[in-house]
Structure formats: structure tokens, C-alpha cells
Amino acid sequence: MACLHRFVDLARRSILRQDMVVGRRAWPSHPNRRSPIGDSAPRRPRSRSRNGQERRMLTPRSEFPKSGATTVAVVTGGHPFDVVGLHNLFRRLDSVNAYIQHYDDYIYDWGDVRTAYDVVIFYNFHREAPGSEQRIWRRPAREALLSLGESKQGIIVLHHALDAFPKWDFWSDLVGFDRMAWAAANDVQLHFDETIPITLVDPEHAITRGLDDFTIEGETWETPGVEDLGPYDDCHVLLATDHPKQMPRQLAWTREYREARVLYLQPGHDLRSFEDINFRTILQRGIQWAAGRLPA
């Protein structure tokens, strides 16, 4: 009987030893050898700071799907918008992967992709320009915006974003329009539910080619007594209107800001614009143009 108990005990120990080595991948006892688990575990990515020293990133860098679509950051904030309508608009644009995000998320750039988007669309309406010391969760906001134009990343200023940061010269230079003169002329009066006739100023541009003049329902901005406010001379006007309650008369223009292509587009107030086939076509092509995928 004692021999039988000893045999059973040895068998149990053998099974436990195999379970640890084969089934559970037991840790090796040698102090200088890594475990199999440790060898396969992902390591945190590293980046380099401005002085060239290596540092650990708090989170890994995000990756865009390998679809070949144009990647777009749509920056919101400071103004309400039709959430479902805006999301559906970008989902209907062919070959566009849009990432709608609040201004704070764009500035903080959690996934470290802010400069990797092909195009950034500003649909925000912030009134105060970021100060030199302003931080969004420790990230400098002013520095992030001032870096626009350092690369060929396209920029689109959509609808009310024309009047974002109204007292900041940088934004005027970016979009190509003197907003301070616009605001100083008179208080801008807003008109909703307007029928706006739109004329193609340049029907041969890559963004407008093949389209005809059209009308759209939307919002207009009136500056009583002012007739001569328009974009800077280096802007190339695509669309205009003779609506008596709209200033500036130019509704879309392109320009270059440093290394970047810039498009301004006035329509885009609500679902009536989002559902308009002409608006969607112009926005779709405008994104591809800003990304450098259509000729200048």
C-alpha cells in the first residue's frame, strides 16, 4: 500500500510539472533569460523631443485604415451644429475618411496624428485667440494652430469658421480675409432660411468643372452700408452671389498659405446645405484639391 501511495504522488508531481512547463509556459529560472511572454509583449513606442532626446510616449500612435481614402480632421467647437446631419454628410463623400472632433481633442492630439491628416476642416467658432500660455491638457493650443501651413496638409475653412478668432491676424492671413475690417464696418446681421443664388466665377477650376450656377437654402451675413469687403487679392474666387444680404459676395475661394492649399466655403449652415448635391460635390472635390489630389 505504501508503494502505491508513493507511485500516485510521483505521478501527480509529474503532471503538475508538465502543466507548468508546457501548458502555462513557466518562467525560466535563469536570471539572464527573458520569458517567452516578455519577448512577445508589445513595447511602448518612443518619440524624440525637440532637443533630440528620446522619450516615452504616454500612448501609442494611432494608425489610419489602409484604404487609400483621404483622411480628414473636422474640427468643431464654439458653435452648435446638426450632429447627425454633419456625420451623414461626410459618410456620403466618396474616398473620404472624416474624423469629426472637438477643438480640444484636435489640439491635445491623443493619438499623435494631428499632422498626419491629409486635410483639416475647421468648422469651429471660437471667439478668443489662444494665448501663448494656454494649454489644452498641457498641450499648447497656439503653437498647434501656428504650425498650420508648415506642410502640404490641406486646410478648409467652412462656413462660420471664417469668423473664428476674429481679432487674430494669423487667422485672417490663413483664410485670406480681413475679419477685423469686416467686424468694424458694422455689426454683422444674420439672416436664416434665405434662398441664395450662386454664380460660378471660375467654371473651369478642378473643384467646379462641369457644374452650373445653382441656388441653395441657407444663412447669409449682412453688413449694412458696406459693399467692398472681399478676400485678399491673392485669393482665387470660385463662387459668388448677388444676394443683397450677403457680405462678402464671394462665397468660395482658394489660396495658398505657406506650403498648404486653403479653401474657404461659405455654405454649410445646416442640413439644407448638407443635402444639396452641388454643395456636396464642391466639398468632395475641395477636400481632394486641398489634399493635392486634384490639379491647382
Image (cartoon, helix red, strand yellow):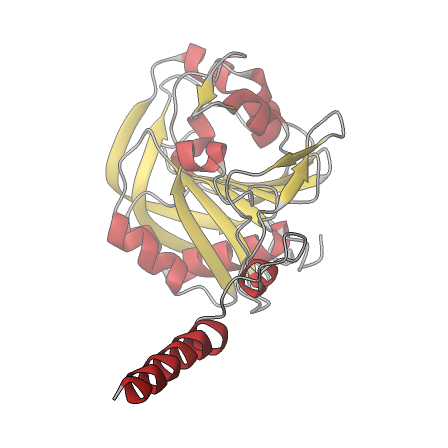
Front in this rendered view, residue 44 or 146? 44
Q: Quadrant of the N terminus?
A: bottom left
Front in this rendered view, residue 247 or 90? 90
Front in this rendered view, residue 177 or 257? 257
Residue sitting at x 59%, y 62%: 209
Q: Is residue 161 left or right of residue 221?
A: right
Q: Residue furthest right?
A: 52
Percent x, y of residue 155: 58, 41
| Residue 31 visible (yes or no) | yes
Percent x, y of residue 2: 28, 84
Q: Is residue 6 above or below residue 127?
A: below
Q: Is residue 32 above or below residue 250?
A: below
> Which quadrant of the view contains residue 274?
bottom left
| Residue 172 visible (yes or no) | no
Q: Number of labelled discs?
A: 0
Q: Residue furthest front?
A: 2
Residue sitting at x 32%, y 42%: 269
Q: Is residue 193 left or right of residue 200?
A: left
Residue sitting at x 56%, y 45%: 113
Q: Is residue 240 left or right of residue 222?
A: right
> Which quadrant of the view contains residue 77?
top left
Q: Is residue 77 left or right of residue 61?
A: left
Residue sitting at x 48%, y 17%: 130
> Which quadrant of the view contains residue 125?
top left
Percent x, y of residue 270: 28, 46
Q: Is residue 15 above or below residue 62?
A: below
Front in this rendered view, residue 132 or 164? 132
Percent x, y of residue 204: 65, 58
